[in-house]
Amino acid sequence: MKSLTGTKLRSFAEAVLGTEIHVFGNVAVAVAACEMTENGADVQRGVEMLLLIKDAGAWQIVSQA
């Protein structure tokens, strides 16, 4: 993504292109490929990762990168 210094961010959209989830008992790792569009033109792609823990029957996010 471009630096926001000296620019005007008029719009931002993010779309998930695909996901993959691995579960190990009460721990899960979720990986999501994403596409971000700034101001309707500047398109970037990236990967987001989440670490989740199942606590009292509900999944909770403990970290995101």
Image (tube, helix red, strand yellow):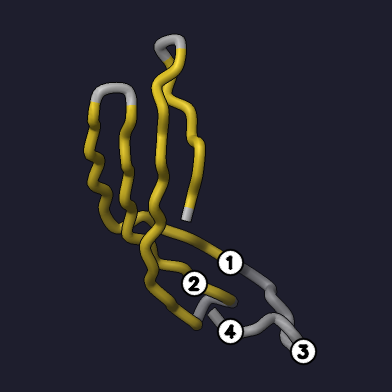
Task: Calculate the distance from the C-alpha at mark 1 to the C-alpha at mark 4.
Answer: 12 Å
What is the three-letter code of the residue carrying label 1?
Phe
At 65% from the left and 84% from the top, the residue drawn is 3
Query: SS of the residue at dot 2?
Result: strand
Q: How many numbered marks, from 0 up?
A: 4
Q: Name the residue under label 1.
A: 12
Say few, some or many: other residues with alpha carbon within 10 Å of mark 2 (under 14 / 14 to 19 / 20 or more). Answer: some
Instruction: For marks 3 and 1, give the one nearer the viewer.
Output: 3
Question: Label 1 near label 2: C-beta < 8 Å?
Answer: yes
Instruction: For marks 1 and 4, give the one nearer the viewer.
Output: 4
Task: Calculate the distance from the C-alpha at mark 2 to the C-alpha at mark 4.
Answer: 11 Å
x, y (%) of residue 19? Answer: 27, 49
The disc, 2 or 4, on the residue closer to the chain's N-terminal end is: 4
Query: Which label belongs to residue 2?
Result: 4
Task: Calculate the distance from the C-alpha at mark 2 to the C-alpha at mark 3.
Answer: 18 Å
Task: Calculate the distance from the C-alpha at mark 3 to the C-alpha at mark 1.
Answer: 17 Å
Query: Which label belongs to residue 37?
Result: 2
The disc, 3 or 1, on the residue closer to the chain's N-terminal end is: 3
x, y (%) of residue 54? Answer: 40, 21
Q: Name the residue under label 3.
A: 6
Question: Label 3 near label 2: C-beta < 8 Å?
Answer: no
Task: Calculate the distance from the C-alpha at mark 2 to the C-alpha at mark 1.
Answer: 6 Å
